[in-house]
Protein backbone atom coordinates (compact mmCIF):
# COMPACT_ATOMS: atom_id res chain seq x y z
CA UNK A 1 0.00 0.00 0.00
CA UNK A 2 2.91 2.33 0.53
CA UNK A 3 4.37 1.65 -2.91
CA UNK A 4 3.55 5.09 -4.23
CA UNK A 5 3.49 5.95 -7.88
CA UNK A 6 4.52 2.47 -8.98
CA UNK A 7 2.99 1.22 -12.22
CA UNK A 8 1.64 -2.30 -12.01
CA UNK A 9 0.21 -5.02 -14.16
CA UNK A 10 -2.11 -7.17 -12.11
CA UNK A 11 -1.89 -10.43 -13.95
CA UNK A 12 -1.49 -13.65 -12.07
CA UNK A 13 0.37 -15.69 -14.67
CA UNK A 14 -1.01 -19.03 -13.53
CA UNK A 15 -4.56 -17.79 -13.57
CA UNK A 16 -4.09 -16.28 -16.99
CA UNK A 17 -2.73 -19.57 -18.31
CA UNK A 18 -5.15 -21.97 -16.67
CA UNK A 19 -8.25 -20.23 -17.91
CA UNK A 20 -10.48 -22.75 -16.21
CA UNK A 21 -8.74 -22.24 -12.84
CA UNK A 22 -11.36 -21.39 -10.26
CA UNK A 23 -10.14 -21.21 -6.63
CA UNK A 24 -13.48 -22.31 -5.19
CA UNK A 25 -13.61 -25.37 -7.46
CA UNK A 26 -10.07 -26.23 -6.30
CA UNK A 27 -11.08 -25.79 -2.65
CA UNK A 28 -14.20 -27.88 -3.16
CA UNK A 29 -12.29 -30.72 -4.82
CA UNK A 30 -9.82 -30.75 -1.91
CA UNK A 31 -12.72 -30.94 0.54
CA UNK A 32 -14.43 -33.69 -1.48
CA UNK A 33 -11.34 -35.89 -1.41
CA UNK A 34 -11.21 -35.71 2.37
CA UNK A 35 -14.99 -36.15 2.63
CA UNK A 36 -14.91 -39.34 0.58
CA UNK A 37 -11.90 -40.65 2.53
CA UNK A 38 -13.79 -40.01 5.78
CA UNK A 39 -17.04 -41.35 4.32
CA UNK A 40 -18.86 -38.31 5.70
CA UNK A 41 -22.50 -38.42 6.60
CA UNK A 42 -24.29 -36.98 3.49
CA UNK A 43 -25.90 -34.17 5.49
CA UNK A 44 -22.56 -33.10 6.96
CA UNK A 45 -21.00 -33.30 3.51
CA UNK A 46 -23.65 -30.99 2.00
CA UNK A 47 -23.44 -28.65 4.97
CA UNK A 48 -19.66 -28.18 4.71
CA UNK A 49 -19.39 -28.06 0.94
CA UNK A 50 -20.76 -24.51 0.57
CA UNK A 51 -20.21 -21.32 2.59
CA UNK A 52 -22.80 -20.48 5.23
CA UNK A 53 -23.03 -16.86 4.10
CA UNK A 54 -21.88 -14.74 1.14
CA UNK A 55 -22.38 -10.98 1.29
CA UNK A 56 -21.71 -8.69 -1.70
CA UNK A 57 -21.67 -4.95 -1.05
CA UNK A 58 -21.42 -1.95 -3.36
CA UNK A 59 -19.62 1.06 -1.93
CA UNK A 60 -19.30 4.63 -3.14
CA UNK A 61 -16.63 7.16 -2.15
CA UNK A 62 -15.37 10.47 -3.49
CA UNK A 63 -11.80 10.14 -4.76
CA UNK A 64 -9.15 12.80 -4.06
CA UNK A 65 -9.72 14.23 -7.55
CA UNK A 66 -13.36 14.94 -6.65
CA UNK A 67 -14.78 12.14 -8.81
CA UNK A 68 -17.28 9.72 -7.21
CA UNK A 69 -16.39 6.05 -7.71
CA UNK A 70 -18.09 2.80 -6.79
CA UNK A 71 -16.40 -0.40 -5.60
CA UNK A 72 -17.61 -3.94 -4.98
CA UNK A 73 -16.70 -5.82 -1.81
CA UNK A 74 -17.38 -9.25 -0.36
CA UNK A 75 -17.43 -11.00 3.00
CA UNK A 76 -17.87 -14.76 3.00
CA UNK A 77 -18.34 -16.97 6.05
CA UNK A 78 -17.66 -20.56 5.16
CA UNK A 79 -18.23 -22.01 8.62
CA UNK A 80 -19.07 -20.89 12.14
CA UNK A 81 -19.47 -24.45 13.43
CA UNK A 82 -16.44 -24.35 15.76
CA UNK A 83 -16.49 -20.62 16.56
CA UNK A 84 -16.66 -17.20 14.92
CA UNK A 85 -15.53 -16.96 11.30
CA UNK A 86 -11.90 -15.82 11.04
CA UNK A 87 -10.07 -14.61 7.96
CA UNK A 88 -8.37 -11.78 6.16
CA UNK A 89 -9.52 -8.95 3.96
CA UNK A 90 -7.81 -8.52 0.61
CA UNK A 91 -7.70 -5.41 -1.61
CA UNK A 92 -7.03 -6.41 -5.19
CA UNK A 93 -8.31 -5.75 -8.71
CA UNK A 94 -8.36 -9.57 -9.13
CA UNK A 95 -10.55 -10.20 -6.07
CA UNK A 96 -13.73 -12.15 -6.73
CA UNK A 97 -16.51 -13.90 -4.86
CA UNK A 98 -15.12 -17.27 -5.95
CA UNK A 99 -11.71 -16.38 -4.53
CA UNK A 100 -13.29 -15.27 -1.23
CA UNK A 101 -15.30 -18.50 -1.04
CA UNK A 102 -12.16 -20.58 -1.55
CA UNK A 103 -10.13 -18.54 0.94
CA UNK A 104 -12.94 -18.72 3.52
CA UNK A 105 -13.12 -22.53 3.18
CA UNK A 106 -9.34 -22.81 3.50
CA UNK A 107 -9.57 -20.73 6.71
CA UNK A 108 -12.10 -23.20 8.16
CA UNK A 109 -9.73 -26.08 7.48
CA UNK A 110 -6.66 -24.14 8.66
CA UNK A 111 -8.26 -23.25 12.00
CA UNK A 112 -9.28 -26.89 12.40
CA UNK A 113 -5.75 -28.20 11.65
CA UNK A 114 -4.45 -25.88 14.38
CA UNK A 115 -7.42 -26.75 16.60
CA UNK A 116 -8.32 -23.08 17.09
CA UNK A 117 -11.86 -22.19 18.23
CA UNK A 118 -12.73 -20.48 14.93
CA UNK A 119 -14.45 -21.17 11.65
CA UNK A 120 -13.43 -19.64 8.35
CA UNK A 121 -14.20 -16.36 6.64
CA UNK A 122 -12.67 -14.06 4.04
CA UNK A 123 -13.35 -10.63 2.61
CA UNK A 124 -12.18 -8.47 -0.25
CA UNK A 125 -12.70 -5.22 -2.09
CA UNK A 126 -12.06 -5.08 -5.82
CA UNK A 127 -9.70 -2.10 -5.98
CA UNK A 128 -6.24 -1.07 -7.10
CA UNK A 129 -4.95 -0.34 -3.59
CA UNK A 130 -1.37 0.37 -4.69
CA UNK A 131 -2.59 3.30 -6.77
CA UNK A 132 -4.99 4.75 -4.19
CA UNK A 133 -4.12 7.41 -1.62
CA UNK A 134 -4.24 6.75 2.12
CA UNK A 135 -7.26 9.05 2.35
CA UNK A 136 -9.14 7.09 -0.33
CA UNK A 137 -8.28 3.76 1.31
CA UNK A 138 -9.42 5.06 4.71
CA UNK A 139 -12.79 6.16 3.31
CA UNK A 140 -13.26 2.92 1.36
CA UNK A 141 -12.36 0.78 4.39
CA UNK A 142 -14.81 2.62 6.65
CA UNK A 143 -17.62 2.32 4.06
CA UNK A 144 -16.89 -1.38 3.67
CA UNK A 145 -16.95 -1.91 7.45
CA UNK A 146 -20.30 -0.18 7.81
CA UNK A 147 -21.67 -2.28 4.95
CA UNK A 148 -20.62 -5.58 6.59
CA UNK A 149 -20.96 -4.54 10.26
CA UNK A 150 -24.06 -6.66 10.90
CA UNK A 151 -22.23 -9.89 10.18
CA UNK A 152 -18.88 -9.12 11.88
CA UNK A 153 -18.07 -8.85 15.58
CA UNK A 154 -15.83 -10.48 18.20
CA UNK A 155 -18.17 -13.46 18.53
CA UNK A 156 -19.38 -13.56 14.90
CA UNK A 157 -16.59 -12.94 12.42
CA UNK A 158 -13.16 -11.40 13.03
CA UNK A 159 -11.30 -9.99 9.97
CA UNK A 160 -7.51 -9.65 9.69
CA UNK A 161 -5.03 -8.30 7.10
CA UNK A 162 -4.34 -10.09 3.84
CA UNK A 163 -2.87 -9.01 0.51
CA UNK A 164 -2.59 -5.21 0.23
CA UNK A 165 -4.17 -4.55 3.64
CA UNK A 166 -2.23 -4.00 6.86
CA UNK A 167 -2.38 -2.93 10.53
CA UNK A 168 -3.62 0.54 9.54
CA UNK A 169 -6.51 -1.01 7.58
CA UNK A 170 -7.45 -3.02 10.68
CA UNK A 171 -7.34 0.11 12.86
CA UNK A 172 -9.82 1.81 10.48
CA UNK A 173 -12.12 -1.22 10.63
CA UNK A 174 -11.90 -1.31 14.45
CA UNK A 175 -12.84 2.38 14.52
CA UNK A 176 -15.81 2.14 12.12
CA UNK A 177 -17.16 -0.89 14.00
CA UNK A 178 -16.54 0.68 17.43
CA UNK A 179 -18.27 3.92 16.40
CA UNK A 180 -21.29 1.91 15.31
CA UNK A 181 -21.56 -0.06 18.59
CA UNK A 182 -20.70 2.94 20.78
CA UNK A 183 -17.55 1.69 22.57
CA UNK A 184 -14.03 0.65 21.57
CA UNK A 185 -14.12 -3.01 20.54
CA UNK A 186 -10.58 -4.05 19.60
CA UNK A 187 -11.50 -7.77 19.44
CA UNK A 188 -13.48 -7.22 16.20
CA UNK A 189 -10.27 -7.46 14.11
CA UNK A 190 -6.77 -8.83 14.57
CA UNK A 191 -3.49 -7.63 13.11
CA UNK A 192 -4.01 -4.17 14.62
CA UNK A 193 -1.25 -1.72 15.60
CA UNK A 194 0.17 -2.39 19.08
CA UNK A 195 -1.16 0.91 20.46
CA UNK A 196 -4.67 -0.22 19.51
CA UNK A 197 -4.34 -3.54 21.36
CA UNK A 198 -2.70 -5.52 18.62
CA UNK A 199 -0.47 -8.42 19.65
CA UNK A 200 3.27 -8.58 20.06
CA UNK A 201 4.69 -10.76 17.30
CA UNK A 202 1.75 -10.36 14.86
CA UNK A 203 3.74 -8.66 12.07
CA UNK A 204 6.14 -11.62 11.71
CA UNK A 205 3.66 -14.30 12.87
CA UNK A 206 3.07 -16.04 9.53
CA UNK A 207 6.80 -16.01 8.87
CA UNK A 208 7.53 -17.54 12.29
CA UNK A 209 4.87 -20.19 11.74
CA UNK A 210 6.42 -21.08 8.38
CA UNK A 211 9.82 -21.23 10.01
CA UNK A 212 8.66 -23.59 12.79
CA UNK A 213 7.06 -26.03 10.33
CA UNK A 214 10.09 -25.81 8.01
CA UNK A 215 12.26 -26.84 10.96
CA UNK A 216 9.95 -29.81 11.50
CA UNK A 217 9.86 -30.66 7.77
CA UNK A 218 13.67 -30.67 7.68
CA UNK A 219 13.75 -32.92 10.73
CA UNK A 220 11.16 -35.19 9.05
CA UNK A 221 13.37 -35.50 5.96
CA UNK A 222 16.46 -35.81 8.15
CA UNK A 223 18.15 -32.79 6.63
CA UNK A 224 19.84 -29.73 8.15
CA UNK A 225 18.25 -26.35 7.44
CA UNK A 226 21.58 -24.55 7.58
CA UNK A 227 23.29 -24.01 4.23
CA UNK A 228 20.19 -24.78 2.15
CA UNK A 229 19.06 -22.66 -0.80
CA UNK A 230 15.62 -21.06 -0.98
CA UNK A 231 13.61 -19.31 -3.72
CA UNK A 232 10.73 -17.10 -2.62
CA UNK A 233 7.83 -16.01 -4.82
CA UNK A 234 6.33 -12.83 -3.32
CA UNK A 235 8.12 -10.42 -0.98
CA UNK A 236 5.34 -8.85 1.08
CA UNK A 237 4.57 -9.56 4.72
CA UNK A 238 4.86 -13.35 4.40
CA UNK A 239 7.70 -13.62 1.88
CA UNK A 240 9.95 -11.07 3.57
CA UNK A 241 9.36 -12.50 7.09
CA UNK A 242 10.26 -16.08 6.18
CA UNK A 243 13.18 -14.84 4.07
CA UNK A 244 14.69 -13.01 7.07
CA UNK A 245 14.16 -15.94 9.45
CA UNK A 246 15.73 -18.61 7.24
CA UNK A 247 18.57 -16.24 6.31
CA UNK A 248 19.33 -15.84 10.03
CA UNK A 249 19.23 -19.65 10.32
CA UNK A 250 21.98 -19.92 7.71
CA UNK A 251 20.03 -20.46 4.46
CA UNK A 252 20.86 -18.75 1.19
CA UNK A 253 18.04 -16.80 -0.49
CA UNK A 254 18.86 -17.23 -4.17
CA UNK A 255 15.83 -15.59 -5.82
CA UNK A 256 12.84 -13.43 -4.96
CA UNK A 257 10.03 -12.11 -7.15
CA UNK A 258 7.20 -9.65 -6.59
CA UNK A 259 4.35 -8.36 -8.71
CA UNK A 260 6.72 -6.13 -10.71
CA UNK A 261 9.44 -8.70 -11.49
CA UNK A 262 12.21 -10.47 -9.64
CA UNK A 263 15.87 -10.71 -8.71
CA UNK A 264 18.30 -13.62 -8.40
CA UNK A 265 21.81 -14.16 -7.13
CA UNK A 266 22.81 -17.81 -7.01
CA UNK A 267 25.34 -16.97 -4.26
CA UNK A 268 22.58 -15.57 -2.07
CA UNK A 269 21.11 -12.15 -1.33
CA UNK A 270 20.53 -10.34 1.96
CA UNK A 271 16.76 -10.09 2.68
CA UNK A 272 17.30 -7.36 5.31
CA UNK A 273 18.98 -5.14 2.69
CA UNK A 274 16.36 -6.17 0.12
CA UNK A 275 13.58 -5.14 2.51
CA UNK A 276 15.15 -1.69 2.96
CA UNK A 277 15.48 -1.41 -0.82
CA UNK A 278 11.79 -2.35 -1.31
CA UNK A 279 10.78 0.27 1.26
CA UNK A 280 12.65 2.89 -0.77
CA UNK A 281 11.70 1.84 -4.32
CA UNK A 282 8.44 -0.13 -3.95
CA UNK A 283 9.80 -3.30 -5.56
CA UNK A 284 12.58 -5.89 -5.48
CA UNK A 285 13.35 -5.08 -9.13
CA UNK A 286 16.83 -3.65 -9.68
CA UNK A 287 18.28 -4.71 -6.29
CA UNK A 288 22.10 -4.37 -6.64
CA UNK A 289 24.25 -7.40 -7.49
CA UNK A 290 21.35 -9.47 -8.85
CA UNK A 291 20.07 -10.64 -12.22
CA UNK A 292 16.44 -10.17 -13.27
CA UNK A 293 14.24 -13.26 -12.98
CA UNK A 294 10.55 -14.05 -13.55
CA UNK A 295 8.19 -16.32 -11.56
CA UNK A 296 8.46 -19.24 -13.99
CA UNK A 297 12.27 -19.30 -13.84
CA UNK A 298 12.22 -18.93 -10.04
CA UNK A 299 9.91 -21.93 -9.71
CA UNK A 300 12.31 -24.12 -11.72
CA UNK A 301 15.56 -23.08 -9.98
CA UNK A 302 17.74 -25.77 -8.39
CA UNK A 303 17.10 -25.13 -4.69
CA UNK A 304 16.05 -26.94 -1.51
CA UNK A 305 13.07 -24.83 -0.45
CA UNK A 306 10.55 -23.26 -2.81
CA UNK A 307 8.34 -20.82 -0.91
CA UNK A 308 5.33 -19.44 -2.80
CA UNK A 309 4.22 -16.36 -0.82
CA UNK A 310 2.08 -14.33 -3.25
CA UNK A 311 -1.25 -15.51 -4.63
CA UNK A 312 -3.16 -18.60 -5.80
CA UNK A 313 -2.30 -20.99 -8.61
CA UNK A 314 1.35 -20.02 -9.13
CA UNK A 315 2.55 -23.64 -9.18
CA UNK A 316 0.45 -25.23 -11.88
CA UNK A 317 0.42 -28.00 -14.47
CA UNK A 318 2.73 -26.01 -16.77
CA UNK A 319 5.57 -25.59 -14.31
CA UNK A 320 5.18 -28.25 -11.57
CA UNK A 321 7.32 -30.79 -13.41
CA UNK A 322 10.17 -28.26 -13.42
CA UNK A 323 10.24 -27.86 -9.62
CA UNK A 324 13.61 -29.01 -8.28
CA UNK A 325 13.08 -28.11 -4.62
CA UNK A 326 12.84 -30.87 -2.00
CA UNK A 327 10.32 -28.95 0.08
CA UNK A 328 7.54 -26.64 -1.15
CA UNK A 329 6.52 -24.53 1.83
CA UNK A 330 3.19 -22.85 1.05
CA UNK A 331 3.30 -19.33 2.48
CA UNK A 332 0.47 -18.19 0.20
CA UNK A 333 -3.04 -19.60 0.29
CA UNK A 334 -3.77 -22.00 -2.56
CA UNK A 335 -0.48 -21.48 -4.45
CA UNK A 336 -0.44 -25.03 -5.90
CA UNK A 337 -3.21 -26.26 -8.21
CA UNK A 338 -4.56 -29.78 -7.80
CA UNK A 339 -2.95 -30.92 -11.04
CA UNK A 340 0.39 -29.53 -9.89
CA UNK A 341 -0.04 -31.27 -6.55
CA UNK A 342 -0.30 -34.64 -8.30
CA UNK A 343 2.87 -33.93 -10.29
CA UNK A 344 4.78 -32.92 -7.14
CA UNK A 345 3.53 -36.04 -5.37
CA UNK A 346 4.94 -38.22 -8.14
CA UNK A 347 8.23 -36.36 -8.02
CA UNK A 348 8.46 -37.03 -4.26
CA UNK A 349 8.50 -33.35 -3.30
CA UNK A 350 7.34 -32.73 0.28
CA UNK A 351 4.60 -30.10 0.00
CA UNK A 352 3.82 -28.53 3.37
CA UNK A 353 0.28 -27.35 2.63
CA UNK A 354 -0.98 -23.82 3.19
CA UNK A 355 -3.58 -24.86 5.77
CA UNK A 356 -0.71 -26.04 7.97
CA UNK A 357 2.31 -24.02 6.82
CA UNK A 358 0.96 -20.47 6.91
CA UNK A 359 -1.20 -20.88 10.02
CA UNK A 360 1.20 -18.87 12.22
CA UNK A 361 -0.74 -15.72 11.29
CA UNK A 362 -4.10 -17.02 12.44
CA UNK A 363 -2.50 -18.56 15.53
CA UNK A 364 -1.18 -15.19 16.68
CA UNK A 365 -4.50 -13.64 15.61
CA UNK A 366 -6.18 -16.10 17.95
CA UNK A 367 -3.83 -14.99 20.75
CA UNK A 368 -4.56 -11.34 19.89
CA UNK A 369 -8.31 -12.01 20.13
CA UNK A 370 -7.86 -13.81 23.47
CA UNK A 371 -5.80 -10.87 24.80
CA UNK A 372 -8.31 -8.28 23.57
CA UNK A 373 -11.26 -10.11 25.11
CA UNK A 374 -9.44 -10.33 28.47
CA UNK A 375 -7.74 -6.91 28.16
CA UNK A 376 -4.64 -8.77 29.40
CA UNK A 377 -1.51 -8.90 27.25
CA UNK A 378 1.35 -11.35 26.66
CA UNK A 379 5.02 -10.59 25.94
CA UNK A 380 6.55 -11.38 22.54
CA UNK A 381 8.44 -14.33 24.09
CA UNK A 382 5.17 -15.78 25.40
CA UNK A 383 3.48 -15.32 21.99
CA UNK A 384 6.34 -16.96 20.10
CA UNK A 385 6.55 -19.87 22.55
CA UNK A 386 2.79 -20.54 22.31
CA UNK A 387 2.90 -20.25 18.49
CA UNK A 388 5.85 -22.61 18.19
CA UNK A 389 4.11 -25.18 20.38
CA UNK A 390 0.86 -24.95 18.36
CA UNK A 391 2.59 -25.12 14.96
CA UNK A 392 4.80 -28.06 15.91
CA UNK A 393 1.87 -29.97 17.41
CA UNK A 394 -0.13 -29.38 14.19
CA UNK A 395 2.82 -30.59 12.08
CA UNK A 396 3.08 -33.75 14.20
CA UNK A 397 -0.70 -34.37 13.94
CA UNK A 398 -0.59 -34.02 10.14
CA UNK A 399 2.54 -36.19 9.82
CA UNK A 400 0.88 -38.90 11.90
CA UNK A 401 -2.25 -38.97 9.69
CA UNK A 402 -0.05 -38.93 6.56
CA UNK A 403 2.00 -41.90 7.71
CA UNK A 404 -0.90 -43.89 9.07
CA UNK A 405 -2.91 -43.55 5.86
CA UNK A 406 -0.03 -43.35 3.37
CA UNK A 407 -1.26 -40.03 1.98
CA UNK A 408 0.42 -36.70 1.26
CA UNK A 409 0.69 -33.96 3.87
CA UNK A 410 -2.03 -32.01 2.07
CA UNK A 411 -4.40 -34.97 2.04
CA UNK A 412 -3.58 -35.64 5.68
CA UNK A 413 -4.20 -32.02 6.70
CA UNK A 414 -7.61 -32.09 4.99
CA UNK A 415 -8.56 -35.42 6.52
CA UNK A 416 -7.64 -34.08 9.97
CA UNK A 417 -9.42 -30.74 9.48
CA UNK A 418 -12.60 -31.96 7.80
CA UNK A 419 -12.83 -34.77 10.36
CA UNK A 420 -12.59 -32.31 13.27
CA UNK A 421 -15.24 -29.95 11.86
CA UNK A 422 -17.52 -32.88 10.98
CA UNK A 423 -17.18 -34.26 14.52
CA UNK A 424 -18.10 -30.86 15.99
CA UNK A 425 -21.09 -30.56 13.67
CA UNK A 426 -22.27 -34.06 14.53
CA UNK A 427 -21.92 -33.34 18.26
CA UNK A 428 -24.06 -30.19 17.91
CA UNK A 429 -26.84 -32.47 16.73
CA UNK A 430 -28.04 -30.09 14.03
CA UNK A 431 -28.74 -32.69 11.35
CA UNK A 432 -31.88 -31.78 9.44
P1 LIG B 1 1.38 -8.72 0.85
O1 LIG B 1 0.45 -7.83 0.15
O2 LIG B 1 2.12 -8.20 2.04
O3 LIG B 1 2.48 -9.27 -0.18
C1 LIG B 1 2.15 -9.91 -1.36
C2 LIG B 1 3.43 -10.04 -2.17
O4 LIG B 1 3.18 -10.85 -3.31
C3 LIG B 1 3.96 -8.70 -2.69
O5 LIG B 1 5.38 -8.72 -2.69
C4 LIG B 1 3.44 -8.67 -4.12
O6 LIG B 1 4.20 -7.82 -4.97
C5 LIG B 1 3.60 -10.13 -4.47
N1 LIG B 1 2.80 -10.59 -5.61
C6 LIG B 1 1.49 -10.39 -5.84
N2 LIG B 1 1.14 -10.96 -7.01
C7 LIG B 1 2.27 -11.52 -7.52
C8 LIG B 1 2.57 -12.24 -8.68
N3 LIG B 1 1.66 -12.49 -9.60
N4 LIG B 1 3.85 -12.67 -8.87
C9 LIG B 1 4.82 -12.42 -7.95
N5 LIG B 1 4.59 -11.74 -6.83
C10 LIG B 1 3.34 -11.29 -6.63
O7 LIG B 1 0.57 -10.04 1.21
P2 LIG B 1 0.92 -11.12 2.31
O8 LIG B 1 0.18 -10.76 3.55
O9 LIG B 1 2.38 -11.35 2.35
O10 LIG B 1 0.16 -12.39 1.72
C11 LIG B 1 0.78 -13.22 0.72
C12 LIG B 1 0.04 -14.55 0.67
O11 LIG B 1 0.10 -15.16 1.95
C13 LIG B 1 -1.45 -14.47 0.32
O12 LIG B 1 -1.81 -15.65 -0.37
C14 LIG B 1 -2.13 -14.47 1.67
O13 LIG B 1 -3.45 -14.95 1.60
C15 LIG B 1 -1.23 -15.45 2.40
N6 LIG B 1 -1.25 -15.35 3.85
C16 LIG B 1 -0.97 -14.18 4.49
C17 LIG B 1 -0.97 -14.15 5.88
C18 LIG B 1 -0.60 -12.91 6.64
O14 LIG B 1 -0.52 -12.99 7.89
N7 LIG B 1 -0.31 -11.80 6.01
C19 LIG B 1 -1.30 -15.31 6.62
C20 LIG B 1 -1.56 -16.50 5.93
C21 LIG B 1 -1.53 -16.51 4.54
Image (cartoon, rainbow, N blue to C red):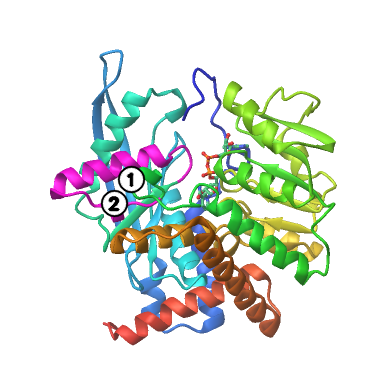
Q: Position of residue 424 (x, y in %)?
A: 38, 81
Q: Position of residue 426 (x, y in %)?
A: 36, 85
Q: Is residue 290 visible to us here?
A: yes
Horizontally, residue 65 falls left or right of residue 22, namely: left
User: The C terminus lies in which quarter of the figure?
Assistant: bottom left
Asked where in the image residue 392 lies, by quadrant, the reply is bottom right
Q: Which residues are magenta?
A: 162-190
**Residue at left offset 48%, top offset 41%:** 163
Q: Position of residue 126 (x, y in %)?
A: 38, 36
The answer as to whether callout 1 falls within 8 Å of ligand 1 is no
Mark 1, other Cα within 10 Å: few <14 / some 14–19 / many ≥20: some
Residue 3's place in the image compared with 255, above or below, is above
Asked if the residues shown at circle 2 and circle 1 are in contact, with their CB atoms under 8 angstroms apart, the answer is yes
Q: Is residue 170 magenta?
A: yes
**Which one is in front, 292 or 41?**
292
Q: Is residue 126 magenta?
A: no
Checking the image for residue 295, the label placed there is: none
**Residue at left offset 48%, top offset 75%:** 418
Q: Main secondary structure of the magenta part?
A: helix
Mark 2, other Cα within 10 Å: few <14 / some 14–19 / many ≥20: many
**Residue at left offset 68%, top offset 36%:** 272
Q: Position of residue 186 (x, y in %)?
A: 29, 51
Horizontally, residue 7 falls left or right of residue 56, namely: right
Q: Is residue 320 visible to us here?
A: no
Checking the image for residue 196, the label placed there is: 1
Identify the secondary structure beneath mark 1: helix
Residue position for label 2: 186
Amino acid sequence: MSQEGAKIKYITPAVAKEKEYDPFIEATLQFERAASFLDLDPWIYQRLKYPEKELTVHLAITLDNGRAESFTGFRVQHSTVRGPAKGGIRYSPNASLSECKALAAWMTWKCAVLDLPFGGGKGAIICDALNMSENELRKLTKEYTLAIRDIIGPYKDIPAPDMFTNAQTMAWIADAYSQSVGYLEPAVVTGKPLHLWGSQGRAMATGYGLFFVLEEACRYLQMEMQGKKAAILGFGNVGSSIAKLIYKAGCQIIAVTDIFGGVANLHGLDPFELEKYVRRTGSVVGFPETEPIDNETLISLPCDFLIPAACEGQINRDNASKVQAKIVLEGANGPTTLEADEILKEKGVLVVPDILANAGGVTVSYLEWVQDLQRYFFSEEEILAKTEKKMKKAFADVAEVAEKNKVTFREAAYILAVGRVADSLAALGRAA
